Amino acid sequence: MKKKIALLSTMLIAMVVLAGCNLPAATMSAGDSQTQVALFAQATLTKFAQLMTVTPPPAEETAEVTQEQPTESLPTAEATATEVPPTATQIPPTATTAVPPTATTQPLETEGGMVRVSFEPGTTNYTVVDTIPANTTRRYALRLTEWQLIDISLDSTTSAFIAVSNEKGKEMVDFSQKWTWYRDFATEAGDWYIDVRTGAYEADINLYLQAPERLSFAADQDSMVADALVPANRAHNFVAWGDKDQTLKVSLNPSEGLVLSIWHTNGNVLISSMAGANSFEGKLPEAGNYIITVFNSTNQAVEFDLSMSIK
């Protein structure tokens, strides 16, 4: 019996040993483990690098995004030329307030397509109120004496410009300059032509024409009194020459309802109508011609005296 038990035990041990020889290895060697870790790390780094790579968007998508961004509108060259005239003849702010509604109720005289402008007796300015079709040039004529100062200002609802010439064909301003105003002295007597040209649209215009009354002292005198009549809600313009550092004094009689503005023909303002003054005393900052405008803020014509001295 003991022999049988010993034999069975030996056989069981042999079977276990033989089974162990046929099983695969349960663990990797140290070298195998290091190799596997290195491969896994390399694969992970490669994948991370791929994920972090920035791929630039196609050119078309970039352009589309740029177009969607809002951009600031820039003024056109034409608008700039209209809104910013040359400094040499810049109209001062008071000149704008001096523009009357209409100088007269009389109809304008038309001469072969040209409109003749005439001031009422005793007045020094006129405003032409007109409507000009698109792409049309309309001519206005005004007769001036030699060395008379002319001041022209155009206001329109759409784009429009002026050209200025005399009856001998001399051009002072042409349309290419895109001016809306002009100021100068007539070098000779005769007709001056103011042409107004519209653009692509019809324009309602106010063409302001001013020819101030010249004030001159008698021989050996430095003061004077000028009398004039200014219509209701209108303005009367004078021009006088003074030297640098001379003192100019101006007063009005009567003064009620009348307001002064004084400025150099280069645009430098001594006193604006906004000040509401009816007298002025001050040193002239430079030599030249000064325009003295008397505004009538009442609803009736006013006859007045203007006292002036330049010393």
Image (spheres, rainbow, N blue to C red):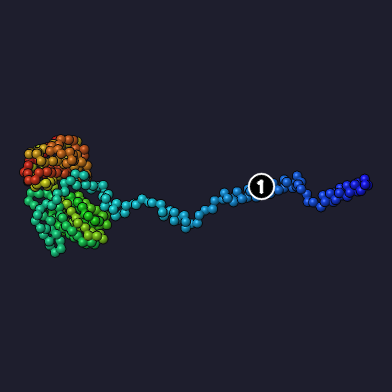
Residue situated in front as seen by the camera: 201 or 145? 201
**Residue beneath the point at 7% across and 39% down:** 254
Residue situated in front as seen by the camera: 94 or 26? 26
Q: How many marks?
A: 1
Q: Is residue 12 left or right of residue 155?
A: right
Which amino acid is tagged 1?
Answer: Ala
Residue 169 placement (x, y as % from top left): 19, 59
**Residue beneath the point at 76% across and 48% down:** 26
Q: Is residue 51 left or right of residue 11?
A: left
Q: Quadrant of the C terminus?
A: top left
Residue 100 placement (x, y as % from top left): 14, 49
**Residue beneath the point at 22% across and 42% down:** 268
Q: Is residue 71 left or right of residue 232?
A: right
Disc 1 secondary structure class: helix
Above or below 180: residue 240: above
**Residue 220 visible, this orientation:** no
**Residue 39 visible, this orientation:** yes
Q: Is residue 265 left or right of residue 2?
A: left
**Residue beneath the point at 81% across and 52% down:** 22
Residue 286 placement (x, y as % from top left): 21, 39
Residue 13 placement (x, y as % from top left): 86, 47
Q: Residue furthest front?
A: 1
Residue situated in front as seen by the camera: 61 or 40? 40
Residue assigned mark 1? 41
Residue situated in front as seen by the camera: 244 or 295? 295
